[in-house]
Amino acid sequence: MALTLRIGQRAVYPSRGIAEVISVEKREIGGKVQSFYVLRLANSDLKILVHVDKAEQVGIRPVAGAQEVDEVLQILREKAASFERHPWNRRYRAYMDKIKSGSLFEVAEVFRDLHRLKKTKPLSFGERRMLDTARGLVSQELSVARSLDRATVEKELDSVLNEGQA
């Protein structure tokens, strides 16, 4: 079944975060009328057009529900994967693939792993930026999913990550 979004609904756009469906537009392309979702990213005024039939293929998905939120918190508590043995550029590519996947769970893994790695050694500039990106994507989605302000969610995430260290 294809993904169907409604005007006013929030969804997740891979590697960009929460977006709101502000309209559905019809455009003529190659003599054929096609429908597009017009999405506005939550943390900017950037608007993105996504072909209705390609939304799922692009990786757009609904905002996480309560069960997914619990799963993310569990992922953050787990021990980090052992990417730290790889050179930073290989880690960077692996983490970037996870962020681009649009999966909240994979982004949470990147957040957890880089947070843990930061405690053992200095991160490269790219890894620090990626940690900030992953943290932002996870906290943004969890704040929307749970109807909480972002600062509250970020405090909880820090607490969960630190209890996973113990």
Image (tube, helix red, strand yellow):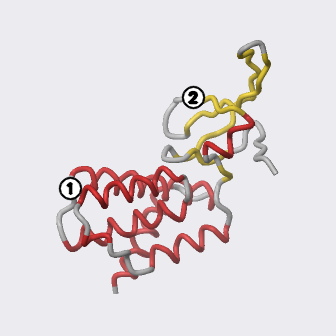
**Rendered position, 122 above or below 39:** below
State the image coordinates of residue 73 (x, y, percent, origin top left). Answer: 52, 73
Seen as rendered, the residue at the extreme front is 30
**Pointer 2 local density, CA inside 10 Å: few below 14, some 14–19, many at least 20:** some
Residue 40 located left or right of residue 22: left
- What amino acid is labelled 2 in the image? Lys
State the image coordinates of residue 127 (x, y, percent, origin top left). Answer: 28, 55
Instruction: Identify which residue is drawn at 45% across, 73% down.
Output: 76
If the image is split into quadrants, where does the C terminus sit? bottom left
Q: Nearer the viewer's eye, disc 2 or disc 1?
A: 1
State the image coordinates of residue 101 (x, y, percent, origin top left). Answer: 52, 53
* Label 2 with label 1: CB-CB less than 8 Å: no
Q: Quadrant of residue 30?
A: top right
Q: Nearer the viewer, residue 22 or 4?
A: 4
Q: Nearer the viewer, residue 135 or 121?
A: 121
Seen as rendered, the residue at the extreme bottom is 166
Instruction: Identify which residue is drawn at 55% across, 60% down.
Output: 104
**Pointer 1 local density, CA inside 10 Å: few below 14, some 14–19, many at least 20:** few
State the image coordinates of residue 111 (x, y, percent, origin top left). Answer: 40, 63
Residue 50 located left or right of residue 140: right
C-alpha gap between disc 2 and disc 1: 31 Å
Tag shown at residue 133? none
Mark 1 residue element: loop
Quick one: label 2 or label 1, which is nearer the N terminus?
2
Q: Nearer the viewer, residue 128 or 59?
A: 59
Tag shown at residue 47? 2
| Disc 1 target residue | 124
Mark 2 residue element: strand
Residue 79 located left or right of residue 90: right
Seen as rendered, the residue at the extreme left is 122
- What amino acid is labelled 1 in the image? Ser
Instruction: Identify which residue is drawn at 39% across, 69% down.
Output: 112
